[in-house]
Amino acid sequence: MMQSPKKYLAHKGWHQTAVIALIGGIYVFGSWALNFNSVDGFIAVPKAFAWLGIYFRPTAHSMEYLPKIWQKLIQTVLLAISSTVVAAIVSIFVALLGSKVTGINSFVQTIVRGVASFFRNIPLVAWSMILLFSFKQSDFTGFLALLLMSIGYLIRAFMEIIEDEASETMLALKATGASYFQVIFQAVLPQILPSILSWILYMIENNVRDATLVGILTGTGIGFIFDIYYKSFRFDAAGMTVLAIIIVVIALETISNQIRRVIL
Amino acid sequence: MINSEENIIQKPKTPRSPQIKLHEQSLSRTMIFIVFGSLILITGYTLTHLDTAGVHVDEAFKGLAITLNQMFLQPNAGSDGVPLLLQALASTVMLSILTTIIGAVFGFLFAVLASKNLTNAYLGAGIRVAMAIVRAIPTIIWALIFSIVCGLGTTAAVLGLSFHSIAYLTKAYSESIEGIDKSTIESLKVTGAKFWVVVFQAIWPTIVASLVSWTFIRLEINFANAIAVGAAAGAGGIGYQLFVASGMSFDFHETGFIVYLVILVTFALEFIAVKIRQIYLNR
């Protein structure tokens, strides 16, 4: 499709202007509909940070909260890890059944895709609240909420990994006359293991952050303790909690990146 | 003749077949083994020490089944009514679009300044560290922090969601920018083009498809986060209705109705994302 340069540039300019106008229009309409004042919002940012610097700064006094915060944080990380690992074990088998490469038939594939998408799109808030109703305020509630959410994400991620990486292997080994289970356990699984581990690590990081939300709603882990300090105006302790979360999340991210560098 | 020919043909030597290793030993394999091993050990430890607060798990699962049945098989709009719920849903969608736009604009600016192939090392490293810290704090905590300063409401929700979006998109965009071939940038610099000309004439067109993909991924995340912020920080919208229905009035029929609404919106967002991505990839 050859166009004269002049015509191409004119078309491009018109197109860009239209897109910018559309996005700007959505922004203005959204601000109006939500009653959000951009100027006030912009001014609030430095104000918020000034406030954080004064009240949220952990003091010598807030050191006494540290053991409790640390204990809850470790507990949260353990929950995030265990829910991800259990979710991964369930998801890998479901993904093998449901992917286009290794799946059984198109009916099962459609069902798996539908179920995964359903689990993924139910809000974490809904999971937390209905589980809280049945399982009460316990770590198990938090574990289940994270587990159900992670399963939805991991099934989709694993299916994509299998379809991207293992389709040629699958064909090649089938041609040699290897049985279905031989192909899966000797070729497909070993081949996709690094990518799967990388996704598990990502999901753990994500679950630590999500665990804060689940914790605020269900009264468990680090989210609960933050909520208590926050609502009782012990802001220095809340600041200490946030600081501890930052350190742990960044540490997890750094470790995962190091592991990824070796395995991928 | 025949005899001599037999002499010419040599018997094939039986080759000494080397031991074929099925699984090659490598650092990568050892690492995978160690990481999986430790993850499974941690999981085993956690699951055996899990506090269930004395709840009978089998009875709880029965209760859960009843709740799920009420939610998914008998949904209704409950006492709030359909118009109110739709209005709340619309405001949550608007909130997620608004914060994605803010996140995309600032995210792109910071990404340009943070990318290793564009700016000086110190500025880039500074922005990357700041963004890593912003990203480490969960969205819900940002919203709660801003709600102390601005009061509960839209402003706190917008700022809280925007902060995390900016940090997330800065990282995503700058990874796309760093993937650009060096020669593209060099060749424009050689012509004497200014910094922002390079950005908008060379970088922007090269990565626009990946920018669009990342922005729509963030829009889906922001929609989920907007629900969470509405529920846990009381910022309104469908999240707040969901929280009230499931945690205060225990109307699981209404909870189910809201969950269906949310799922519909996420499907619609995914559909739109796929369509727009196709437009940009085909250009």
Image (cartoon, coloured by chain):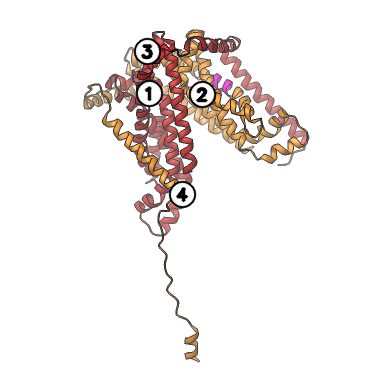
Chain colours: A red, B orange
Query: Eyeballing the image, is B156 above or below B32?
Result: above
Task: Report if residue A163 lies within the magenta region.
Answer: no
Dot 1 amino acid type: Leu
- Judge by depth and name the residue closer to the eye, A160 or B265: A160
Q: x, y (%) of residue B199?
A: 69, 30
- Give the numbered dot on residue A73: 1
Q: Is residue B238 visible?
A: no
Quarter of the image where one finds residue A65: top left
Horizontal relation, residue A203 to residue A33: left or right: left
**3 vs 1, front mark:** 1
**Chain to which the residue tagged by mark 1 belongs:** A
First in sequence: mark 4 vs mark 3: 4
Mark-to-mark CA distance, 3 and 2: 23 Å
Q: State the mark number for residue A228.
A: 3
Q: Secondary structure at mark 4?
A: helix
Specify which label sits upstream in the sequence, 4 or 1: 1
Query: Mark 4 — residue?
Result: A167
**Residue A209 image point, x, y percent:** 43, 25
Measure the alpha-carbon separation of dots 3 and 1: 14 Å
Residue B133 numbered mark, or none: 2
Q: Magenta stretch?
A: B97-103
Q: Residues within 10 Å of mark 2 (few under 14, many from 20)?
A: some
Q: Is residue B40 visible?
A: yes
- Cα gap from disc 4 to disc 1, whole angstroms: 41 Å
Instruction: Tell me the subunit letter for badge 4.
Output: A
